Amino acid sequence: MNTENNFWPVENHPGLVRDTSTGAIINRDMTGYDQYMSNYNRIKKEREELEQLKGDVSSLKSDISVIKELLIKMNQE
């Protein structure tokens, strides 16, 4: 099991440590990770909202076409 003694700080990179048993570089900057996830979720939500708006516009265009056709038929009678 890793303890604090098994990690060495990476020079000139605060938040990064090297695992002395595997040599792996580990990011311990939870604030940065939380900011990344917050931004990722915000962008994902914006994309979902955009897709919903596209669907709504498409539906409205279809409804307007139907109404237009009905008005044309009513005018011809």
Image: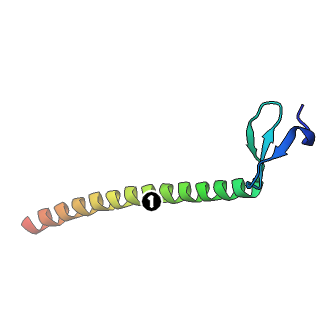
Quadrant of the rendered structure where residue 35 is?
A: bottom right
Describe the element under mark 1 as helix, strand or loop.
helix
Horizontal and vertical percent position of residue 47: 48, 56
- Depth check: 77 or 58 in front? 58
Q: How is the image coloured?
A: rainbow
- Tell me, yes or no, if residue 47 can be seen here: yes
Q: Is residue 53 left or right of residue 64?
A: right
Q: Quadrant of the N terminus?
A: top right
- Depth check: 39 or 53 in front? 39
Q: Residue furthest bottom?
A: 75
Q: Is residue 42 left or right of residue 31?
A: left
Residue at (85% x, 41% y) in the render = 7
The residue tagged 1 is: 50
Horizontal and vertical percent position of residue 65: 22, 60
Compared with residue 70, is residue 8 higher up or lower down, i.e. above or below? above
Q: How many marks?
A: 1
Horizontal and vertical percent position of residue 20: 83, 35
Residue at (73% x, 54% y) in the render = 13
